[in-house]
Image (spheres, coloured by chain):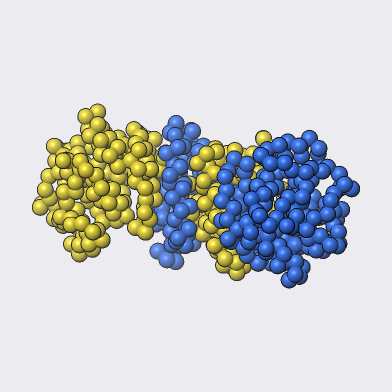
Chain colours: A blue, B yellow
Amino acid sequence: MKTVSVFGTGNVAFHMVKAISLLKDYQIEEIYGRNESKVNDFCNQFTFDLNRVSSIEELKPADFYLVCIKDDAIESFIEKIARPEIICMHTSGSLDLLDKNCKNAVFYPLQTFSKESDLNYAEIPFCLEAEDNFIYKAIEGLAQAISDSVFSISSQQRRSLHTAAVFVCNFVNHLYATGEEICEEKEVAFEVLKPLIKETAEKVQRLSPTEAQTGPAKRNDQSTINAHLNLLGSKKHKQLYQQLTNSIIEKYEQKL
Amino acid sequence: MKTVSVFGTGNVAFHMVKAISLLKDYQIEEIYGRNESKVNDFCNQFTFDLNRVSSIEELKPADFYLVCIKDDAIESFIEKIARPEIICMHTSGSLDLLDKNCKNAVFYPLQTFSKESDLNYAEIPFCLEAEDNFIYKAIEGLAQAISDSVFSISSQQRRSLHTAAVFVCNFVNHLYATGEEICEEKEVAFEVLKPLIKETAEKVQRLSPTEAQTGPAKRNDQSTINAHLNLLGSKKHKQLYQQLTNSIIEKYEQKL
């Protein structure tokens, strides 16, 4: 049985604890959070018992230290907990593989995590990196126990994926929010758009998004574009509409 | 048994024919397309026989004429096929309820249609409008036979929904395509992003997108934003990143 200690009390930590607790060859050693009452709240969300610790000095050793804390705190934190015999993994998309006094590795689950979501862990892509092949094999074993989708990804590739993820997740969600604002303004239920949102995401599971593109901008249909611009009440919606429309027209104009 | 003739040979026509052919109280009377060989190709996609017609003069009467042709051709086309006793419905999100010499109605399925997709018709929102309550009840009967999600929507509301749909479908897909371009440029598989795309769409089925927003722009995390801007190779990706980031920062800055 291998042991994993999880550091952090946010959404990534939550889902990693849930995922690892389901495995037969791995067990959670401890949960660390620097705020004692936060760690207690975090651990009390689970139906099983978890050892908790709030002081670095009291940390037990484990085969893996899985650090799920904020990006800007990771480096100095791993500096403090590093031990030469322990594999210390961070879970950040934008941070390089570190070079601390431990077995350095990256264990980046490329998904958006919220406590409300029941995720199918087998489908989460894990992007892995390690400073040597021996460490890589060890973290790959853990990732493959959780998921069917495990990739060896360099720091540079991971940064690119993280940037692309901002487009397909954060920016996409902002467009959903803009759709919701338009519905509220015009007193129609945002509900009506939900199946379209789902199918638009489904479509690119099978088709390339470049092939899947439809709409007035792709056709450069100026009369529909102008009708939409006139209908939009807020200046910021008009601006976003114009910018995205221009970007689509530019992409497809050679193909028209 | 009520009869429906379908006009057009595109993706909307395809799925309407498929959906209606499954109903027990409705049957397809004829498929109309002005190009004979196109109509034949269209009809040959189905496993059942369909009557086909390419001349307006030879059109048979039916309880419903369902017009699934391009927006800019609809008005003049319905002008030609209108008969006072027939309910003529168009399927456009941006066109008003017409005032032709027929029973005027709108039958707008708010979904993105492609031939490759197996859609669950019961989940498609149908946005209906008719010039009187009698006609409305008739088209509502047809819509409810197909779907569990039927809405009475005015022309003005429909235009708003159509505009919001451009944001949550066409623009969203363009961001997927941008993510794909970044992956290609940096030689990582776009595949890795697909579960994230799916979960981002799933999340707003339950949560408001304004609540679901995450990412560096929401936190106004300038160091990550700048790292992403530096990493992006193409000027148009940088521009899109900056515009969407600004729009998110503006939305949340009061809340930070």
Residue drawn at x 39%, y 50% is: B112
Q: How many marks?
A: 0
Residue B32, quarter of picture:
bottom left
Q: Quadrant of the C terminus of chain B?
A: top right
- Residue A64 is left or right of residue B178, and the answer is right
Q: Residue furthest top?
A: B133
User: Residue A144 in the image: x percent, y percent?
Assistant: 63, 61
On the question of residue A225 being in view, the answer is yes
Report the front residue among B223 and A240.
B223
Q: Quadrant of the N terminus of chain B?
A: top left
- Residue B99 is left or right of residue A14, and the answer is left
User: Residue B130 in the image: x percent, y percent?
Assistant: 26, 34
Residue drawn at x 18%, y 55% is: B50
Report the front residue among B152 and A49.
A49
Report the front residue among A82 and A156.
A82
User: Residue B98 in the image: x percent, y percent?
Assistant: 26, 38
User: Residue A65 in the image: x percent, y percent?
Assistant: 77, 55
Residue drawn at x 36%, y 54% is: B118
Q: Residue furthest right?
A: A57
Residue drawn at x 51%, y 47% is: B201
Q: Residue furthest bottom?
A: A133
On the question of residue B215 being in view, the answer is no
Residue A115, quarter of picture:
top right
